[in-house]
Image (tube, helix red, strand yellow):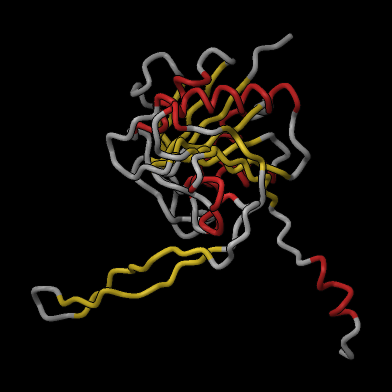
Amino acid sequence: MSELLILITNDDGYSSKGIKALINAVKNLGKILIVAPDSPQSGMGHAISVNKPIRCYKTNFFDSVEAYCCTGTPVDCIKMGLYLLKDKKPDLILSGINHGSNVSTNILYSGTMSAAVEGALSGIPSVGYSLTDYSDDADFQYSEKIVQIISKKVIKEGLKKGTCLNVNIPNIKENQIKGIKVCRQGRAFWDDTFDHRKDPLGKDYYWLTGSFSSKEQALDTDINYLENNYVTIVPTQFDMTCHDSVDELKKWKL
């Protein structure tokens, strides 16, 4: 039986603490190839580089693990990784561990989750991992255990084609974790605003700010479970068709 091949990326950049924890968690599961952004790429969503060249170069940052820095987005990194592997295909694609939550509709903006979705588009079992701690010195010790548990299960059981997993881990002590819940994505949105400022030359510029708030009180969502100290797993797909509306729209007289 051939050795398992795992492709790893993230959106916080190759030097982040989260990707080191992810690598450490799965280093004994098979051969690893890392293709990660050379700088932070948070909030890039499913963006790809089409108007500029992508540079990709080897790095020894991860010691004996084969690794490349990429000037592109997280999705570019997955595409580049598949290109570098040529006739080989990863058995598993992992993205993260992200510094900060990717709960609910945040997956639309998340570079971490978009990399996992790109893996699903290629028919490869893929998982995006996030810890709800934005600090550079976040403690990923317990997160590594979660990565091991879920990644091993995905390897053993597989995933439905076209599906990836969005895993969020609460930022609390291990003994406070109540368990792992498979659930649906909650409805929450950003209430956007802009902080209007002026530069030293008197010209206007803006910082996008705002707050993220839930729009429902349901108990079966990732938002609720995460707030109540559960690790959440949301099966995520790239088919964005609103199937319930197809038959209704067919009735329109167009």
Q: Is residue 102 left or right of residue 141?
A: right
Q: Is residue 237 left or right of residue 133?
A: right
* Nearest the eye: 155 or 119: 155
* Nearest the eye: 221 or 197: 221
Residue at screen point 89% across, 74% down:
247
Q: Residue furthest top?
A: 1
Residue 10 vs 154, above or below: the answer is below
* Nearest the eye: 181 or 67: 181
Residue at screen point 91% across, 83% down:
251
Q: Give coordinates of residue 45: x percent, y percent.
A: 51, 55
The image quadrant where one finds the C terminus is: bottom right
Residue 16 vs 48, above or below: the answer is above
Residue at screen point 84% across, 72% down:
246
Total number of numbered discs in the rendering: 0
Q: Give coordinates of residue 192: x percent, y percent.
A: 40, 72
Q: Residue furthest bottom?
A: 253
Question: Residue 242 lies in what quarter of the image?
Answer: bottom right
Residue 65 vs 111, above or below: the answer is above
Q: Give coordinates of residue 113: x percent, y percent.
A: 55, 47
Residue 55 visible, this orientation: no
